[in-house]
């Protein structure tokens, strides 16, 4: 068994009672501002020759508005603390890490197939999915800097930010207020809506959100969902760039 405990001074600080108004603040102050900021940034840079700037801005908005809302709207307002969120003390058990890895492998195939099927049934094409991929590929020169920025932002920072928000803030808020199945579905719905740029991706994210929420509760730690999310996104980035390199090599 591998289990460590890190106890920052404020991890168990007393918190003020949360109300449904606080949930509204979390949703509109975090995800709401992120959507509005993303639309604004997208309109400003849509005519740029390179998507690299858009990618970097998207990563920054995710970290600052999604992850940052946990700190500014939750921690600083004394509505929650790192212990309640499940971040500290760090609890990592080897068998949970093994379960996380196995779930990631299964989910990669299952939710991808379901997402693509839903995408085709609803839109009849994969244009919106292609648009998401274009953010990483269109008008970008394949290079180590581009790959490392994508891996760091989308593969690591994004998952940490989103798990802090969707599981640590939103799902945690619902735990004492809803039955298990309902809070899992509701927090997963929020997670799916956070990826609403295409029907297939939204459904795929909803499925992933269900698994992450269940794992979050059973493991009583945010680190396992974070690990699963990082592995999933990092694999996707690596696979995408590997495909592009092979495509260039074979002139396809």
Image (cartoon, grey):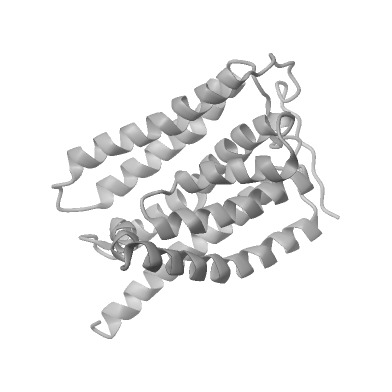
Q: Which residue lies furthest to the right in this view?
A: 1
- Left or right: 147 in relation to 222: left
- Where is 195 relative to 34, above or below? below
Image quarter in which the C terminus is found: bottom left
Residue at 82%, 52% (x, y): give it: 2
Number of numbered discs: 0
Percent x, y of residue 95: 80, 60
Residue 98 image-quadrant placement:
bottom right
Q: Which residue is pictured at 43% across the width and 60% down the height?
A: 200
Q: Which of 19 and 15 is in front in this view?
A: 19
**x, y (%) of residue 163?**
58, 43
Q: In the rendering, at what x and y percent does residue 90 appear?
A: 74, 41
| Residue appearing at x 38%, y 52% in the figure | 149
Residue 92 at what x, y percent from top left?
76, 49
The residue most toward the front is: 121
Q: Is residue 4 rendered to the left or right of residue 125? A: right
Task: Say if 60 sits above or below 123 in the image.
Answer: above
**What residue do we see at 32% from left, 68% from top?**
124
Front residue of 99/124: it is: 124
Q: Is residue 248 left or right of residue 175?
A: left
147 or 212, nearer to the observer: 212
**Up/down of 56 relative to 132, above or below:** above
The quadrant of the picture occupied by the N terminus is bottom right
Vertical relation: 132 (above or below) 14? below
Furthest residue to the bottom?
250
């Amino acid at each position: 068994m591998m289990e460590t405990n890190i106890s920052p001074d404020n991890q168990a600080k007393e918190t003020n009672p949360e109300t449904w108004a606080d949930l509204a603040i979390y949703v509109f102050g975090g995800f709401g501002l992120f959507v509005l900021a993303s639309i604004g940034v997208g309109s400003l840079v849509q005519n740029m020759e390179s998507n690299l700037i858009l990618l970097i801005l998207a990563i920054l908005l995710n970290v600052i508005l999604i992850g940052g809302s946990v700190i500014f709207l939750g921690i600083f307002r004394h509505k929650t603390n790192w212990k309640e969120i499940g971040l500290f003390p760090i609890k990592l058990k080897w068998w949970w890490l093994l379960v996380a890895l196995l779930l990631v492998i299964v989910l990669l195939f299952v939710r991808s197939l379901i997402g693509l099927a839903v995408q085709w049934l609803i839109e009849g094409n994969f244009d919106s999915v292609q648009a998401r991929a274009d953010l990483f590929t269109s008008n970008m020169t394949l290079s180590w800097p581009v790959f490392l920025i994508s891996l760091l932002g989308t593969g690591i920072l994004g998952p940490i930010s989103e798990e802090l928000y969707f599981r640590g803030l939103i799902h945690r808020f619902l735990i004492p207020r809803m039955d298990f199945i309902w809070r899992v579905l509701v927090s997963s719905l929020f997670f799916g809506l956070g990826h609403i740029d295409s029907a297939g991706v939204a459904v795929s994210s909803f499925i992933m959100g269900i698994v992450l929420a269940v794992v979050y509760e059973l493991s009583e730690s945010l680190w396992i969902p974070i690990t699963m999310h990082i592995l999933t996104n990092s694999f996707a980035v690596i696979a995408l760039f590997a495909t592009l390199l092979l495509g260039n090599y074979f002139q396809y």
